[in-house]
Amino acid sequence: MPLKLMNQTKKTDVSPKKESESFDRARDLFIESAGKISANMLGMVSKVGGQMYALLFLSRRPLSLDDIVDTLKLSKGNVSVNIRLLESVGLVNKAWVKGSRKDYYEATRNYPQKLLRDFFDRVRGGIDDSLRMINRFKVEFEEAAKGCQGEQVEDVQFNILQLYLLETFYQAASKMFEDFYQGRSIDIDLLRRVILE
């Protein structure tokens, strides 16, 4: 048999059933992994929500709640609760399917962008909260220092100094985020000092 013809024959040896099983296994593993990542990344959505989003993200057509239930082997109540959560955070939208009265859903395709934006917003909010807390306790320590004597004065002054150092760190981080959001170039040396030193 000529080599060219023999190679063509080998390619057709893989049965359509095996190819389908291989595809299903790869898809299922991706969905399972996406659920774990979603649950670990910022707690934005639950493991089940992450699996549902991954299924919808990989689907070329909108899926009904029944489709999701059947594919992921979940209860309808669990799917219903999580689909509402995914809708509320803008990761899925309802889709109209001609000739059906069921609700269908499709994934929005901006998940990585939304995940990063939410991550930065949370970090920025945490920095702002930290600065407010530091300022409040600086005032309290400074007030407390007025009634202190002896070694306690040194303890309070040390605590105030620590809060000022902490404030410097958070102010640098806040400036970095402000520059980022305003489209200004970020001071790389400042970023390095904030993260690594």
Image (tube, rainbow, N blue to C red):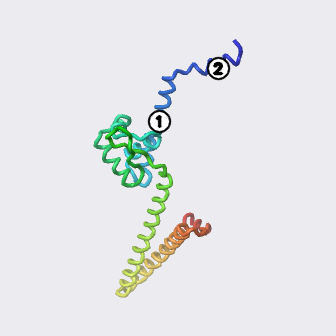
Q: Secondary structure at mark 2?
A: helix
Callout count: 2
Q: Can you name the residue that lies furthest to the left here?
A: 77
Along the horizontal axis of the image, is 56 left or right of 197?
left
Q: Quadrant of residue 101?
A: top left
Q: Secondary structure at mark 1?
A: helix
Q: Nearer the viewer, mark 1 or mark 2?
A: 2
Residue at x-position 36% and y-position 80%: 140
Residue at x-position 33% and y-position 50%: 84
Q: Is residue 125 above or below residue 21?
A: below
In this figure, which residue is indicated by the disc labeled 1?
A: 27
Q: Can you name the residue that lies furthest to the top here?
A: 1
Q: Is residue 193 above or below residue 154?
A: above
The CA span between labels 1 and 2 is: 28 Å
Query: Residue 8: x percent and y percent?
Result: 64, 20
Query: Residue 80: x percent and y percent?
Result: 31, 45
- Front-lying residue, 172 or 62: 62
Residue at x-position 35% and y-position 38%: 99
Quarter occupied by the C terminus: bottom right
Q: Quadrant of residue 188?
A: bottom right
Q: Amino acid at mark 1?
A: Arg
Q: Is residue 68 above or below residue 9?
A: below
Which numbered disc covers residue 118?
none
In this figure, which residue is indicated by the disc labeled 2?
A: 8
Along the horizontal axis of the image, is 86 left or right of 124?
left
Q: Give the class, few, some or many, for how many residues have Cα within 10 Å of label 1's Cα (few <14, many ≥20).
A: some
- Front-lying residue, 153 or 105: 105
Q: Amino acid at mark 2?
A: Gln
Residue at x-position 50% and y-position 52%: 112
The mark nearer the N terminus, 1 or 2, is 2
